[in-house]
Image (cartoon, helix red, strand yellow):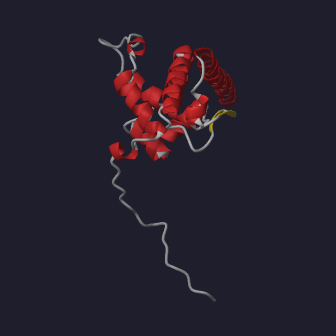
Amino acid sequence: MGRFKDYSYEQTVFLPINFNKQILPGIFEYTLHNLIDEKIDLSLFYDRVHNDETGAPAYDPAILLKIILFAYSRSIITSRTIARLCVENVICMALSADTSPHYTTIADFISTNSKEIIDLFTRILSVCYTQNIIGKNMFAIDGCKISSNCSKEWSGTKKELLEKAGKIEKACSYLVKNIKKQTRINIIRVRKQKKRNQ
């Protein structure tokens, strides 16, 4: 019989991870992180949080936006899967500063702010195209492929550019609509399960 390398599932490994070093320049996640932290006015989201005197601390809207838009960029649309990303995916952990919002928090944030999220995602994708960050491959938003040839795609008349931006916005709207639908299905499923367990 052949010989094999030793292995053990009982071993423990310490993996030191610096979250800042996971979000490198030149990738979508870096642009997402920087735009949300430094360029985009999020006061609209902050104004909706009213727990100054009472209530538990809320998740920072910047964190929720980063993880949601990161998930969207990977065609991940269910709040449960997005929540799981926060504990299983190192880049998502880095974007969320190792917070783990519950899927109901994510679903509520999406349903409350869907129009703003669509607008924001469209703006971020547009910046990524102009900076040639989404390139070399096709970038898909829930099956809607967008060409990666930025220099060709983002040149032309103002009318053509507005049409291209409109296509991105339409794809983002479609994505959020599917998320809302999936969230409603999940809520109904959870309610049915609770009734069965009573």
Q: Quadrant of the N terminus?
A: bottom right
In the rendered image, residue 59, in percent from the top left (x then y), is placed at: 39, 25
In the rendered image, residue 94, in percent from the top left (x then y), is placed at: 40, 41
In the rendered image, residue 16, in percent from the top left (x then y), is placed at: 33, 54
Residue lying farthest to the bottom in this orientation:
1
Q: Residue at x 37, y 37 (%)?
A: 97
**In the drawing, does residue 1 fall left or right of residue 65?**
right
Q: How many marks?
A: 0
- Image height of 174 relative to 52, above or below: below
In the rendered image, residue 111, in percent from the top left (x then y), is placed at: 57, 17
Q: Residue at x 35, y 44 (%)?
A: 19
Q: Residue at x 52, y 26 (%)?
A: 126
Q: Quadrant of residue 61?
A: top left
Query: Is residue 198 visible from the viewing direction of this image?
Result: no
Q: Residue at x 40, y 27 (%)?
A: 35
Q: Quadrant of the C terminus?
A: top right
